[in-house]
Amino acid sequence: MSVAQSQAATEMHAAVRRLSLHPLSKYRLPCPRFSEPLELLSFSYDGQRKVCFDNRELKYFHPPSLNPAPCLFDGIESQIQRDHGKNEHIDGLLAALTHRHSSAPLECQPDFIMYRGMLTRIFVTPYSTRDSWTMNATKVGATIYVEDTPKNVADQEDPTEFHQKMMYSGYRFETLCVLDQPSRQLKRDGLLDSALLSRPNSVVDTNREYCSVFKTRLGNHSIISGAEVDCIDQEKPDTAPNRVYRELKTSGILDNERKVESFERHKLLKFWAQSFIAGIPIVTVGFRDNNGILRSVEDFRTQDIPRLVKHSQSMWQANVCMNFADQVLQFIKDSVVDEGPEMQYRIAFDSGSQEIQISALGRLEPFLTREYLALVVQP
């Protein structure tokens, strides 16, 4: 690298654009426009993390049995764990879009393509101010692609024993709530009772996933996103399947006011954001005691969750989350301007300064797949 190139690179890295989080009052505006998510296609990850363009991993909801009450820590030593040390980038999402493009190309390129997790992270930031985070972005044509950073992926490699048990309890709860076929079909075939009896013995395999790819719009920003779907309430309809998807979550039992406040302030915020973004109408929460015993199950309607916490002035507000996300997406648009798959940017929320910061990383190995780039980059 020449002296001039070195100086240019230093100047590029030094140029950091900043968006202050505070005061939150500037986001207390009417909610920006939000379009109902529309599923474009779906796909499955099989046990080897291979992307399959079918419904093989779609699961069907059936309420878990509480008699006897199951332990959500049972079977933890037998689980099959996904390798979180491997950064899959947004390969699955791009593979799905590449597959769709062969039969039904998109009418126009969206402003953003990213997994739901990145949008959720932005949505909850106004009320999760102690949690720093980072993302990478690149712009190709009119579209900005956003992915998690290697650091965030690596941080999942070595969780504490307590955190491992909590994560496992969530997966275990899912296995106790789902069937491989609709219960109506199993009942018709005389197989429902045996399917329900086998659920407690199911081995948790976190390699397997079912994902929905959908398009939506927040304010003036068109978005294509992908989200893991826990289950569906019925046989999948041809149109608007999001309306019958269901999110499955766990929480400790709420046996005192402090726990209720923490649940409403933190967990319901994330539950709402995740489900709202993907258009999933119901969140089913399993409440466990300190020994992991599932004590109760409760449904929360996504659209009602903001009203559940509205009684307290210190709680979160959905319009603040939405307006903040709208402004952050515009900030990203204004900052990620140099095109090309090698040109990458770092988007970060710094909990110390309470700012969103965007800086150019320079030219790096693209995180978009070659197959996808062959479709969207003109020779």
Image (cartoon, rainbow, N blue to C red):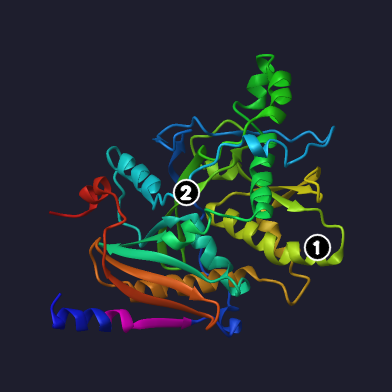
Disc 1 or 2, which lies upstream in sequence? 2
- At horizontal 73% and vertical 76% (from top left) the residue drawn is 314
Neighbours of disc 1 within 10 Å: few (<14), some (14-19), many (20+)? few
Q: Position of residue 322 (x, y in %)?
A: 55, 69
What mark, if any, has residue 38 been given in the picture? 2
Residue at which label 1 appears: 260
Compared to 37, does 42 lie above or below? Answer: above
Q: Position of residue 272 (x, y in %)?
A: 63, 58
Residue 148 seen in the figure: no
Q: Is residue 14 found inside the magenta-colored segment of the image?
A: yes
Neighbours of disc 2 within 10 Å: few (<14), some (14-19), many (20+)? some
Displayed quadrant of residue 169: top right
| Quadrant in which the N terminus appears | bottom left
Q: Position of residue 24 (x, y in %)?
A: 60, 81
The foreground one among 271 and 295 is: 295
Compared to 340, does 98 lie above or below? Answer: above
Residue type pointed to by label 2? Leu
Compared to 198, does 121 lie above or below? Answer: below
- At horizontal 60% and vertical 78% (from top left) the residue drawn is 28
SS at mark 2 in the image: strand
> Which residue range is magenta in the image?
12-19
- At horizontal 67% and vertical 26% (from top left) the residue drawn is 183
Which label lies toward us, 1 or 2?
Answer: 1
| Quadrant in which the C terminus appears | bottom left
Left or right relative to 213: residue 204: right
The foreground one among 165 and 342 is: 165
Q: Are marks 1 and 2 in contact (CB under 8 Å)?
A: no
Left or right relative to 68: residue 376: left
Displayed quadrant of residue 8: bottom left
- At horizontal 41% and vertical 73% (from top left) the residue drawn is 330
